[in-house]
Amino acid sequence: MSDAAYQHPLMAAYWRQLDTRFAQVEAVFDDVMAEALAVLSREGIDAYLEAGRVIGKLGRGVEPMLAFLEEWPSAAQAVGEDALPAVMALVMRMQKSPNGRAIAPFLQTLAPVARRLQSAEQLAHYLDVTLDLMTRTTGSIHGHHTTFPSPGLPEFFAQAPALLALLTLAGLRNWVEYGIRNYGSHPERQKDYFSLQSADARAVLQRERHGTLLVDVERRLDLYLRGLWGDHDHLVPYSTAFDELRKPVPYYDKLGIRLPDVYDDLGEISGLDRYRATLAHMVGHRRWSEAQVADNWSPFQRMAVEFFEDCRIDTLLMREYPGLRRIFLALHPKPLETACDPETTSCLRHRLAMLSRALLDPDHGYLDADLNDFVARFHDLTRDGESSTREIASLALSYVARTRRQSDQFAKVHFDDTVVDYRDDNRQLWTFIEEGDEEEAFDQKRKIEPGEELRGLPPRHYPEWDYASQTYRPDWASVYEALHPSGNAADIDRLLAKHGALAKRLKKMLDLLKPQDKVRIRYQEEGSELDLDVAIRSLIDFKGGATPDPRINMSHRTDGRDIAVMLLLDLSESLNEKAAGSDQTILELSQEAVSLLAWSIEQLGDPLAIAGFHSNTRHDVRYLHLKGYSEHWNDDVKARLAAMQAGWSTRMGAAMRHAAHTLAARPADKKLMLILTDGRPSDVDAHDERLLVEDARQAVKELDRDGIFAYCISLDPKADEYVSDIFGRQYSVIDHVERLPERLPQLFVALTK
């Protein structure tokens, strides 16, 4: 372009300073310069044009130059002009590395990133994170150097604005660090991670986010539902992080109750209380709402019915639990009466939000006559009973008929302070005579998958150790716990009778270990009984005129063993195999051994819990309770042992962490976890045979840190190859499995005497 093309000589000078012939840049030059002149200083303009000129000469085409010219003025306004040298330094580092193609994505997202960070110092930290990602993932594929660009870098730049909307810079650094460590040498998996496509990426992102995560409070909420409301269903999270345009709303359907994956605290209301309010509201609908035929109602009428019915439900909930009023009112918006202009905007939502507030809040302060009239009618309707959805719908239609305005049809709708975010989307309120694709029946029973009836409570999620990167994979294994099904208790009685002679020998050993229950504590002023010797001496002193010793009582304390024991049984498929030299399966021999051990520990009086585990990938680790600490050795426990079955694989680390969760809470001086297994840790989704071995080893370290002594009894003749890697010296290998019923109780006695 010639200088004559510009009317203003200053613009011609700027064009010469930029020194480019890109036609695409020429087309937008006036616009970008107008913005730059509005926000940049004279020195800033010179630096801006010089940086644009340098980027245009990199040989990367027009995209990087266009991105910089369009983005930098806005970025400079957010973080200051002084940040430009650091930005250009990173651009030049990328240019000199194999990552030149990432320059355009970097510059294209520079402005939104800067607006999130709001300071040059924060931007410098972001650039450091970027540089760390680039240098540690470039040329690291298959041992080649300076040949391959970083696969995840362009993906990271594309996601950076969304990530910074959810994370602090410290959280971003942790998220990036996890991706580098785990996927630095896996190009495709690295791209999936940094583009937020992998489950790992989302799991780590949620862990670094602020707020209350559903995964952390799921069990508490499930117990809240069951205990307070007599209701239960699967709690299914949906993400609030990846859908900027369509904000999802809580709802329930045949697959369960859908809740946000994270709730931030809102003022004085904690994230946990926000979950409780949402669940209470949905339980109220499930208890009191009745579906209405919606085919002949307009969208405005349906909206009004939903607002009125929501308020009826909240009123009934607050009547049952008055403490909910404070939470509901704190979470419910309070729109200003004059906030919406009906001359230009549809105010229907605004009017309904005000009405909703007024129906719940006696001190609402609104002056509108129609609003106050319907508030009074609502309370008359609900004062003496529950009323019904049909009655409340009739009231809502009357409200629409009286308050309808022509402006309600306007395309511009007032949304500010109209969303009550603890309420669900009310899909359960409507039924359709002519059902369309979108009106799927919400109340159909959820299909139960085979074996799913054993998944009692929601899962606990445990990390898993990745030895290659020396980091934990967060929330990697899902452990479902349930009470083991029952069989015939008489089968266990027959097994014990079969080993009667062994039981007698064990009884003699156990008698030696039994604590002497009572030890006298003498010279007590107050006690459970009189210490006769001391009392007589005191009486003699009294008769002789001396001051008697008042400590004439004694008490007793129990001099018992303070040991809590957890017996963890591997119930994987291999237990169905025949034991060498025996016509019994390893499972049957394990039943006999566990029965004898449980009987032995009952004789000693030590608290004992028994559980079995097996797994079918990390998503489904089953943990089955056979005996609880508070249960005695009775027919209920025997019936569960009699029904023991084996199947699937051995994800030992997750099971040990879950068992430790219960054992660590026991008030005992010594805590012993016995793991009975017949093979190395493995699972169908773990292709590296070292992975789960190393994870189990890490789990043993965690147990030791928590004061739990882990001891393995292995039935695998080849266990010496790996068991010491997991348990150190804390293991025994029983080569002759047929001797298990004898050896298991003896090992326990040796460990605890």
Image (cartoon, rainbow, N blue to C red):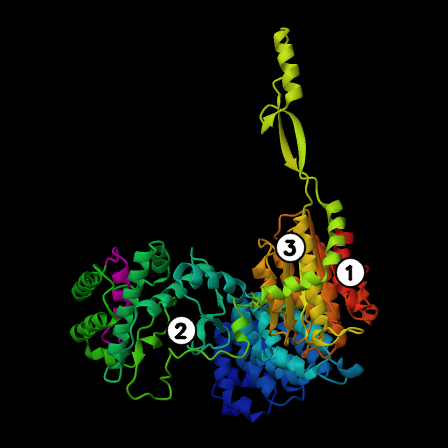
Give the residue drawn at x 74%, y 55%. Answer: 748
User: Does dot 3 land on a helix, a strand or a loop?
Assistant: strand
For residue 743, the mark is 1
Q: Which mark is residue 251?
A: 2
Examine the structure image and report whether residue 346 is included in the region drawn in magenta. Answer: yes
Please tell me which of labels 1 and 3 falls first in the chain.
Answer: 3
* Crowding at mark 1 (Cα within 10 Å: few <14, some 14-19, many 20+): some
Residue 190 horizontal/vertical position (percent):
66, 80
Question: Which structural element holds mark 2?
Answer: strand
- Three-letter code for the amino acid on which mark 3 is drawn: Leu
**Which quadrant of the view contains residue 20?**
bottom right
Q: Is residue 676 left or right of residue 443?
A: right
Residue drawn at 37 percent across, 71 percent down: 424
The residue type indicated by label 1 comes to: Arg
The region drawn magenta spans: 342-365
Give the distance between the C-alpha atoms of the residues marked 2 and 1, in whole angstroms. Answer: 55 Å
Q: Judge whether residue 212 can be spotted in this image.
A: no
Between disc 2 and disc 1, the foreground one is 1
Mark 2 closeness class: few <14, some 14–19, many ≥20 residues within 10 Å:
many
Residue type at tag 2: Tyr
Residue depicted at x 76% and y 45%: 512
**Dot placed on the residue nearer the N-terminal end, 2 or 3:** 2
Crowding at mark 3 (Cα within 10 Å: few <14, some 14-19, many 20+): many
Which marked residue is nearer to the observer: mark 2 or mark 3?
Answer: 3
Q: Secondary structure at mark 1?
A: helix
Horizontal relation, residue 448 to residue 107: left or right: left
Pointers 2 and 1 in contact (CB under 8 A)?
no
Question: Distance of mark 2 from mark 3, alpha carbons?
Answer: 42 Å
